[in-house]
Amino acid sequence: MSESGLKRELGLLTATIFGVGGTLSAGNFVILGYAASLAGTSLVIIVFFCGIISMLTMLSYCELSTAIPRAGSEYTWSKVAFGGVFSFLTGWFQWTSNIFYASLSSLGLAYILSYFFPLNITLTAVAIIIIFTLINIGGVKSAAIAETFITLVVMAILALYVVDGWMYSLKLQGFEVSAPKGLWGCFAATAFLFELYLGAEAIAVAQAEIRDPERVIPKAMILSSLILTVLYTSIVYVTVRVVPVEVLVEQTSPIAFAAELVMGRAGAALISGVIVVAGLAAVNSAVMAQSRILYALSRDRYLPGALSAIHERFRSPHIASLVGLVFTVAVTLVGAVNFVVYLVNFGFIIGFAFVNLVLIKLRKEKPRMRRPFKAPLFPILPLAGISISMILLLFMDKAALIVGGESIMFALLTYYLRMVGYRRLRLAIGGISLGTGILIAFLTFMTETKLIALSLPNLKVVPLTYVLIFVSTVQILAGTLNITATSPKIEAPKKWRERQ
Amino acid sequence: MGAKNALASLVGLLQIFIGVSAIVFAYLLHYNPSYLEVRTLLGLREEYVAFFFLVLGVIGFFSIISGILVIYEWSFARKVSYE
């Protein structure tokens, strides 16, 4: 039994397959078309390269998950290494990434289903999210063994697709590596496909259920990374070999299209069926993970206490689940799967960089800490992991970077609102009001005296100058009132004072 | 209620009003609904819409919070007592 009360049932094989299963999201199989439009057939090399990058960070995961074998993985490790705002940001990125991942997995499922049935993709994805949130609120027991069995079946059928595709490709002309958008396109495709390998870190999350975790976790993580690299590279090779890139780009479900060519309509249905089943597990894990992270952040007082409420009957963090549901549905309603992929990648790339930073910090500050597994080539590998993460950020979609930046600002604002206290918050808001008022007054003066020519809207009904003077006066007064207000000292009741 | 408290409440209410108006105005600018074509009405060029939307949104957000704090601080916080 682990300290959490869970039974240690997962051996090396089941833990490895559990890690592989964590990455098999339906979303992974619908984004290949867009990736092919960026990188052409060099997609094969890029998928292999992404696997290597992921493995670099997996080595850091191996060390940290065996050195700090506690629930919470990345968030807990950064709490041990840094604490404060850094651990909050790590938890925040874990939370938002899982929200985006849940959204991506459900959109991917909807796209694959739409290959066979005429469905509204966005509404189907929203329905999937709602169903899984309700299932999670109802309380889900760990289903690692069942997931392992499903993953084995999925892997076997995907292997069959690879073999059939390989045989089919022997009849075709030779394979040429192409990159229609050059090196930039290849880097952009790498930043886009980074999410293919996300999920193997689920092994660290399930550490409480793994037998002999110090020995099994590192082996399972490295093995699952190797299996995934081989599996994805083979699938992508077969797909771009069988379907011309310009045709692949136009498909809603590229793998189903390729499977139909290779294995016929029944084969396409079989492949889509297993991806849907595997995808259901991915949606479930992401929905569950986001609610647990939100619960942990609230339990550690980073977020309002209501989020750590546990449902009396189902014993699950129902408020955290429902709050997560609102955000996931909002992201899903955007409906743009490629944009959501970039958002997932943004969160996980920063999360991976944080994990490598934590590793470096702990090696420097706690050299005598017990480490059953040590990541090799320190500090080259973690530094390489951080550098590659930062480089990949440069090639991401600009809109996703802006949303990611806003998410960081929102996280910092939330953190400081919780931590700095009411009085400082009031002073800060008062200062902002005062500053805004003075700025508006100054701009009004400058425009009225023609010192600057501002292209202000031409308001004919109300003279703009009077509106601006009124707004600036109210802002200055309100700012002054907020800054000068001194709340009376609240004294405790007499009986409390006497008791002390 | 003293004159100072009454003035503070009035300023707080006006600031909330300004904040809400700024956000409504930002919304009208961004979505430019067909029943009230604000952009045409103001002769506002397309490329400035995002800038005005951002500025109005931020000012509106902080004005509402500041207004609430002014009212709370000058009208309610002073009356709080355990006895």
Image (spheres, coloured by chain):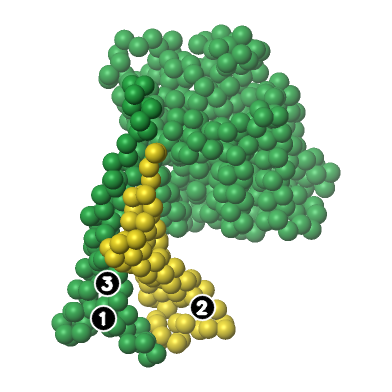
Q: Is residue A352 visible?
A: no
The Cα–Cα distance between marks 2 and 1, rounded to whole angstroms, is 22 Å
Identify the residue at image location x=80%, y=54%.
A117
Q: Nearer the N terminus, badge 1 or badge 3?
A: 1
Which quarter of the rendering shows the C terminus of chain B?
top left
Name the residue tied to disc 3. A472
Q: Nearer the viewer, residue B48 or A165?
A: B48
Q: Secondary structure at mark 2?
A: loop
Which chain has been coloured yellow in this picture?
A: B
Image check: A184 left or right of A311? left
B23 lies above or below A350: below
> Tag 1: Cα neighbours inside 10 Å, few (<14), some, or many (≥20)?
few
Q: Residue furthest bottom?
A: A460
Callout 1 amino acid: Leu
User: Image quadrant of residue A182?
Assistant: bottom left
Callout 2 amino acid: Asn
* Nearest-to-viewer mark from 1 and 3: 3
Q: Nearer the viewer, residue B45 or A439?
A: A439
- Which numbered marker is on residue B32? 2
Q: Are marks 2 and 1 in contact (CB under 8 Å)?
A: no
Callout 3 amino acid: Ser
Hue used for the chain lettered A: green
Identify the residue at image location x=28%, y=56%.
A482
Q: Secondary structure at mark 3?
A: helix
Q: Is residue B3 visible?
A: yes
The Cα–Cα distance between marks 3 and 2, rounded to whole angstroms, is 26 Å
x and y, in percent, of residue A39 in the image: 51, 51
- Which numbered marker is on residue A454? 1
